[in-house]
Image: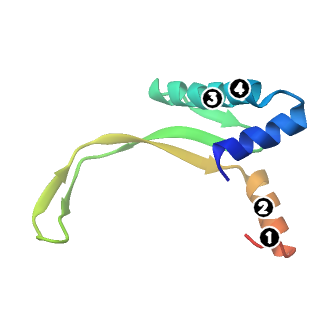
Amino acid sequence: MTKADIVGIIATRSGLTKQETETVVDGFIQTIIESLKSGERIEIRGFGTFNVRKKNKRIAHNPRTGEKVLIKEKYVPTFKISKEFKAVVSDKLKKGLKP
């Protein structure tokens, strides 16, 4: 499913135009990005939690040359699915819905 598919479904269900819906979806995504950039945690009950996790610097190996490579410290966005969301998807798949 693409963003355009999501916009189409929401527009149909809400009665908004696709353009209005796309503006809302873009605003939602941008709000999450901006919040994570400022280090905030975002919790959407029944859906999941967005967070930023620090990855320490480390030494890795280039698999082709075997050379050691230093990977710098970085921050990565993470998402943890809520128990409710996980249970609903699992139950639906158990009942025969093909992924």
Distance from Cα at disc 1 to Cα at disc 2: 6 Å
User: Is disc 2 placed on a helix, strand or loop?
Assistant: helix
Label 2 amino acid?
Val
Q: CA distance from mark 3 to mark 2?
A: 25 Å
- The residue indicated by pointer 1 is 93
Q: Which residue is mark 2?
A: 89
Contact (Cβ within 8 Å) of mark 4 with mark 3? yes
Residue 77 x, y percent position in the rendering: 48, 41
The numbered mark at residue 26 is 3
Mark 1 crowd level (few <14, some 14–19, many ≥20, 10 Å Cα): few
Which of pointers 1 and 3 indicates the residue nearer the eye? 3
Q: Are marks 1 and 2 in contact (CB under 8 Å)?
A: yes
Amino acid under disc 3 = Asp
Q: Position of residue 21 (x, y in %)?
A: 75, 29
Q: Mark 1 or 3 closer to N-term?
A: 3
Q: Amino acid at mark 4?
A: Val
Mark 3 / mark 2, whichever is N-terminal: 3
User: Could you tell me how far apart the alpha carbons at marks 4 and 1 are, in whole angstroms?
Assistant: 30 Å
Question: What residue is at 65 percent from the left and 43 percent from the top?
Answer: 3
Say the numbered circle drawn on residue 24: 4
